[in-house]
Image: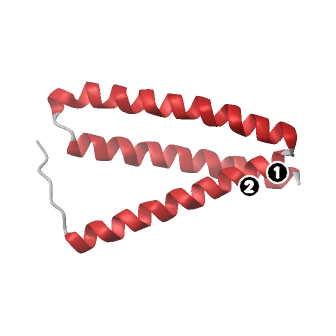
Amino acid sequence: MIVLIYVGSFLIGLSNSSLRIIMNTMLMEIVPKNLMGRALSVWMGIALLLQGVFAIRLGLLIDVFSPSVGFLCMGGLIVVGVAVQFFFTSHKEKRKLKYEVI
């Protein structure tokens, strides 16, 4: 059971870092340089707000049930995120959207 917790923590940490790198890269490609600071500060503000809200709710869920339920919820969120990413990526390729990098 302990090994499963370590593997789950590793996968959650790995996906969190990868997601942050991908999102920052996309923002830097799409947002003009003169608006980059504003866009990143808004994005970080939203991310910190969501982290605080979900951390509290996940902590309460773990207190009521067990840590394994928390890992299942995080795994479910990862699966949903990957599915949404594939959905948007496949539609983007079909429409062949182009944007200009300044």
* Count of numbered tags: 2
Disc 1, SS? helix
Left or right, 52 with reference to 98: right
Residue 92 in the image: x percent, y percent?
27, 66
Residue 59 in the image: x percent, y percent?
75, 35
Q: Quadrant of residue 32?
A: top left
Query: Circle 1 is placed at which residue position?
Result: 68
In the image, residue 72 sits, relative to residue 91, either above or below, namely above
Left or right, 34 with reference to 82: left
Separation of marks 1 and 2 at Cα, in angstroms? 6 Å
Instruction: Give the quadrant of the N terminus.
Output: bottom right
Q: Nearer the viewer, residue 23 or 54?
A: 54
Residue at 78 percent of width and 35 percent of height = 60
In the image, residue 42 sits, relative to residue 23, either above or below, namely above
Query: Circle 2 is placed at which residue position?
Result: 72
Residue at 58 percent of width and 55 percent of height = 78
Q: Quadrant of residue 23?
A: top left
Residue type highlighted by circle 2:
Leu
Residue at 57 percent of width and 33 percent of height = 51
Residue type highlighted by circle 1:
Ser
Left or right, 31 with reference to 23: left
Please say if the residues under marks 1 and 2 sit with CB atoms less than 8 Å apart.
Answer: yes
Farthest residue, direction bottom: 94
Left or right, 78 with reference to 62: left
Disc 2, SS? helix
Q: Residues within 10 Å of mark 2 (few under 14, many from 20)?
A: few
Residue at 70 percent of width and 36 percent of height = 57
Residue 74 in the image: x percent, y percent?
67, 50
Q: Residues within 10 Å of mark 1 (few under 14, many from 20)?
A: some
Q: Nearer the viewer, residue 63 or 40?
A: 63
Residue 69 in the image: x percent, y percent?
79, 51
Instruction: Give the quadrant of the C terminus.
Output: top left
